[in-house]
Amino acid sequence: MKKISALIFGLISIISFSQEKSEEVILDSIVKEADLLYKYEKVAWNSTDLFMSKGKLKKNYGGYVIYHSNDTIHASFIDKSQEKRIARYSFTALDLEVPYNSNFELIELSESERELLDIKIKIVKKLSDEKYEVAFPQGFNPNLVLLKDENEYRLYIIMGTPKSNIIPFGNDYLFKTNLNGEIKEWKKFHSRIIPAQTEMPDGGKVVSAVHSHLKTTPYITASDICTFRLYGELYGMKEFMVLSTALGKYFKYNIDENKITITEP
């Protein structure tokens, strides 16, 4: 009987350990995706500010694409005809604030730039279909981040806002397509916009934010982390938490550690 009990206890321990390792892999993959998403959007923010300060170039603005090669992230700005590149800013992953190179040569789009622009346009045109339920609340604007893998494209839509002391969580989407830009699956992570305040009514600073997820979004998301990093940096916030109603757990993300930890409620 003791041997059977020991065997059962051993099996339970193995299953529990396996589940923990599996969840750790999931959380690590979320952080990895969030890192890339953040780098792209941070470069988009900083390069757009630089580009828009160039009055002459600004008048010929027709869009931009972001892409990376190893540890370099490029932001290419395209003319109104969407045929030529009018500026490119290049950043290293270690410094997303100041480009190490700026190029204002007027040249034809490269093959990769042309491909990214065409795919981005193709996906965006499909988003008007009512089945995707894409809508943007007043006071918040969409930021589109296109990522490419060997076998697919991923277009994230995350919220931005000009409002002060707000972190615009929620109303975020992910569209996965094949290499031809045909949408194969999509997800809306939150049912609505969830603006988190960074300042108390009396002027005191909020040190942490928390929101909950529907059962259809069991884990903290890469878009949650990206949005928090972008705005948390502006307001000196270091961490936030997500309550998973599906799993009955809190997921806490800390900027300094760049890590997700699990807390039982």
Image (spheres, grey):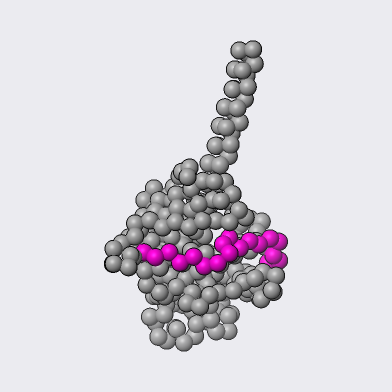
Asked if residue 226 shows in the view, the reply is: yes
Q: Quadrant of the N terminus?
A: top right
Q: Nearer the viewer, residue 151 or 137?
A: 137
Q: In the rendered view, does 260 fall on the left or right side of 246?
A: left
User: Can residue 187 be found in the magenta stretch?
Assistant: yes
Asked if residue 158 shows in the view, the reply is: no
Residue at 52% of width from left, 64% of height from top? 170
Q: Nearer the viewer, residue 209 or 151?
A: 209
What segment carries the magenta color?
179-198
Based on the displayed image, in which of its 4 quarters is residue 101 positioned? bottom left
Residue 72 image offset from top left, x and y in percent: 46, 60
Based on the displayed image, in which of its 4 quarters is residue 157 positioned? bottom right
Residue 133 image offset from top left, x and y in percent: 65, 70
Based on the displayed image, in which of its 4 quarters is residue 115 positioned? bottom right
- Considering only vertical position in the picture, is 95 above or below 244? below
Counting the numbered discs, the total is 0
User: Can residue 208 be found in the magenta stretch?
Assistant: no
Residue at 71% of width from left, 61% of height from top? 184
